[in-house]
Image (cartoon, rainbow, N blue to C red):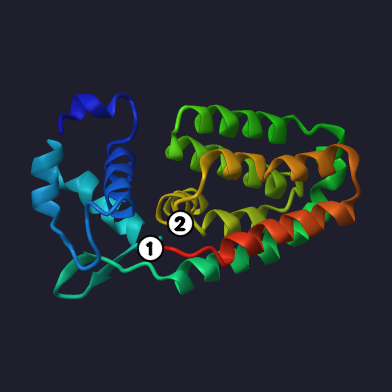
């Protein structure tokens, strides 16, 4: 892989995304050792961005660094993903009512994200679904104005785990997009209580979705 393919993006970010994609789609199976020098040669970059990418990926719990052995792909279990969705349920369920006044007055961040999801679904783009779904849910957190809540939410690596859920759970892309429509409608025309209920139910449904 040439560095020309990375465009203007940070090398470590692009390397990280490439490795992440391969972990999620099964190219790198659980137990695979991710060797820094080997990856650097394959991507046509120095070892520094690969080292940084692997360090950041260890925070996602999709890979793990074992002292004196190296970095390996973890087996992401149903329990791992369920735990994340339950944490999101608590965070986003609490955020919904707090965010209601802001998003009721201006729901355009949610509308834009839903339109992005619909376009991605039409194109069969699972990465796009994950990206715009993340934008949708982040907008709810941002609208609370609570910086600590946003910091905690960001630490969950929502986009990576959403992509893993979509691919491993064989989620219908159109259904994934449209699942957000009632939430948008509630922020536009409903009540804070309805928003809380719908956001909570949404996260619960994904917490129990079977994974390969």
Q: Residue at x 52, y 45 (%)?
A: 172
Of 117 and 153, nearer the camera is 117
Displayed quadrant of residue 108:
top right
Left or right of 115 in this view: 127: left
Residue that appears at 90% across and 44% down: 190
Q: Quadrant of residue 180?
A: top right
Q: Is residue 95 above or below residue 14?
A: below
Residue 206 lies, in percent from the top left, at 58, 60
* Residue 82 locus on image (x, y percent): 53, 69
Q: In which quadrant is the N terminus drawn?
A: top left
Along the polypeptide, which appears first: circle 2 or circle 1?
2
* SS class, disc 1: loop
Residue 37 in view (yes/no): yes
Indicate the secondary structure of the residue bearing disc 2.
loop
The residue pinned by badge 1 equals 212
Q: Is residue 208 left or right of residue 77?
A: right
Image spot of residue 70 (x, y percent):
17, 68
Residue that appears at 78% across and 34% down: 107
Which residue is under mark 2? 169
Q: Is residue 145 left or right of residue 160?
A: right
Task: For label 2, count other residues whose C-alpha is less than 10 Å away and answer few (under 14), some (14-19) or many (20+).
Answer: some
C-alpha separation, residue under disc 2 versus residue under disc 1? 6 Å
Q: Residues within 10 Å of mark 1 (few under 14, many from 20)?
A: few
Please indicate, yes or no, whether residue 45 appears anywhere in the rendered image.
no
Q: Are marks 2 and 1 in contact (CB under 8 Å)?
A: yes
């Amino acid at each position: 892989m040439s560095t020309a393919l990375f465009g203007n993006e940070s090398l470590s970010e692009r390397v990280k995304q490439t490795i992440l994609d391969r972990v999620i789609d099964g190219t790198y199976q659980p137990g695979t050792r991710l060797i820094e020098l080997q990856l650097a040669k394959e991507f046509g970059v120095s070892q520094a961005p690969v080292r940084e990418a692997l360090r950041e990926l260890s925070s996602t719990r999709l890979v793990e660094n074992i002292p004196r052995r190296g970095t390996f792909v973890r087996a992401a279990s149903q329990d791992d993903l369920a735990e994340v969705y339950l944490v999101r349920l608590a965070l986003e369920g609490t955020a919904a009512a707090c965010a209601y006044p802001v998003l009721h007055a201006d729901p355009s961040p949610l509308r834009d994200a839903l339109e992005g999801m619909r376009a991605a679904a039409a194109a069969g783009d699972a990465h796009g679904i994950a990206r715009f779904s993340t934008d949708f849910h982040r907008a709810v957190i941002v609208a609370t104005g609570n910086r600590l809540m946003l910091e905690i939410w960001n630490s969950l690596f929502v986009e990576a785990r959403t992509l893993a859920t979509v691919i491993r759970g064989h989620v219908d892309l159109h259904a994934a997009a449209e699942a957000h429509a009632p939430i948008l409608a509630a922020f536009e025309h409903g009540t804070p209580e309805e928003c809380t209920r719908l956001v909570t139910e949404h996260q619960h449904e994904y917490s129990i979705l079977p994974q390969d």
